[in-house]
Image (cartoon, rainbow, N blue to C red):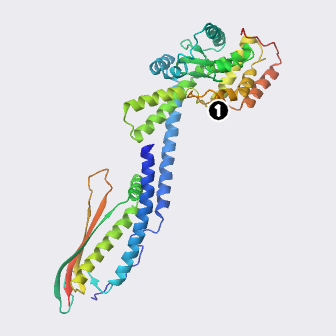
Amino acid sequence: MFELTALVVLSVLGYFFGRHAESKHFASIRAREAEYQSLLVFTEGKLPPGDWRSGGLVGGNVVISVDYFKRLAAGLRALFGGRLTTYESLLERGRREALLRMKEDALRRGASMIINVRLETASISKGQGDQIGSVEVYAYGTALRS
Amino acid sequence: MSYENPEQPEGINVTAEHPLREFFSLLLMLLLIVAVALTVLSLAAQSLARFVPFAVEARIAELLDGPLATVMTDETVAGDAESLAREAYIRELAVRLSGHMDLPAEMTVTARYSNAETVNAFATLGGQVVLFKGLVDQLPNENALAMVLAHEIAHVQLRHPIVAMSRGLTVSLALASVFGLTDNAGVMQLVQWLGVTSALSFSRSQERAADALAADAVLAEYGHLEGATDLFRALNGGAEEASASPGLPFPEFRATHPALSERIDVLAQRAAALGVSGQPTPLPW
């Protein structure tokens, strides 16, 4: 009975705090994406035509924790199969936040474009069964100054 | 090749569906599956339990020792001359009634009398039948006593205690294995507790079946059904006293049984259809 109560309390807390954090994060992501829209990013590795100087390697890194509710919902979903929607939004936040941090890094160096952009994703608590997991997303690329 | 970053539309990677909606629909599905699985298990256990030999049931009752130990404590077990006399009387009546009930040869019924004030009676594993002082005191004649005794013996004959226990045990063990109850002591406690509670958790259809068999036995013994309904009238009036003696882990006799008025009607109709009337046999106390 205690375990069940703890589970319910943790899930409810996870749901409300997690949802609040997520909606705040998405709002911040959207605002900053609009702000940095002029800084162009590409996966293309070749230099665009024109006169460019390298701004060096720029990168942005973010680690986001799974909340208890997301984990429970994903556990339920794992029984039936299908889209893990609670994790999808988590990774979406991670990728966009990492790209934004990379852009911030590039803007500090006075860059106007980032080419050869790559994304890496890692699970922090891999293999630790009972741990609430967290995900790391790292975005990096080559900054170019005109 | 033009170099530009068009604005990405929202909602490509994030679904618009509310997470709680998905969560609860999955939870509901899971609960449904669990409920269906438990129902199937429970039905299987119930239908298989009647094939457990009575000797095995008696051994289980001995091993558990729980159902009776909780009600037959030092204070309530028949000890003084009066309650011993009552117990002997009840046993003798039980033997006479069982004679009319066509019990299998290996099935033995042990009737016990308890000094507890509870207005109750029950049958449990191994053919153990217990009548409480609280109920016996309210019975006006031997026919009513015979009715309650035959009713409990009928439960034994129909294997209701072992069926109830098997059902409870199967469901509990299934739940325990799903939720990871690995503690052996916990499982043993569960089994003990089930032994106790299964004594009275019979379904209404089981109660009706027991009533019908009991009426047959009472009719065979006395030649009429006069006085038999007094049992239910006594139970009806004894509700307050029953709740005044707490501490016993049994639900009230009334709680799991069909409506008493309904049972009185069924019995009265049967007596009327029979067209035979007689005098209730008085009790010696």
* Side of A82 where B259 appears, left or right: right
Q: Secondary structure at mark 1?
A: helix
The answer to whether one can see residue B136 in this image is yes
The quadrant in which the C terminus of chain A is found is: bottom left
Residue B152 occupies quadrant: top right
Residue B102 occupies quadrant: top right
| Residue closest to the eye, A33 or B33 | A33
- Residue at x 73% of width, y 15% of height: B143
Above or below, comparing residue A92 to residue B211 in the picture: below
How many discs mark residues in the rendered view? Answer: 1
Instruction: Where is residue A47? Give x, y as percent.
Output: 19, 86
Instruction: Where is residue A3? Give x, y as percent.
Output: 42, 45
Residue B214 occupies quadrant: top right
Farthest bottom residue in view: A50
- Residue at x 71% of width, y 32% of height: B259
| Residue closest to the eye, B250 or B240 | B240
Above or below, comparing residue B113 to residue A20 in the picture: above
* Side of B201 where B186 appears, left or right: left
Instruction: Where is residue A90? Give x, y as percent.
Output: 36, 66
Residue position marked by numbered label 1 in the rendering? B255
- Residue at x 43% of width, y 58% of height: A13
Label 1: how many Cα within 10 Å (few below 14, some 14–19, many 20+):
few
Above or below, comparing residue B13 to residue A124 in the picture: below
- Residue at x 33% of width, y 55% of height: A132
- Amino acid at dot 1: Ala
Instruction: Where is residue A22? Give x, y as percent.
Output: 40, 68
* Side of B244 where A103 appears, left or right: left
The quadrant in which the N terminus of chain A is found is: top left
The answer to whether one can see residue B12 in this image is no
Above or below, comparing residue A32 to residue B42 in the picture: below
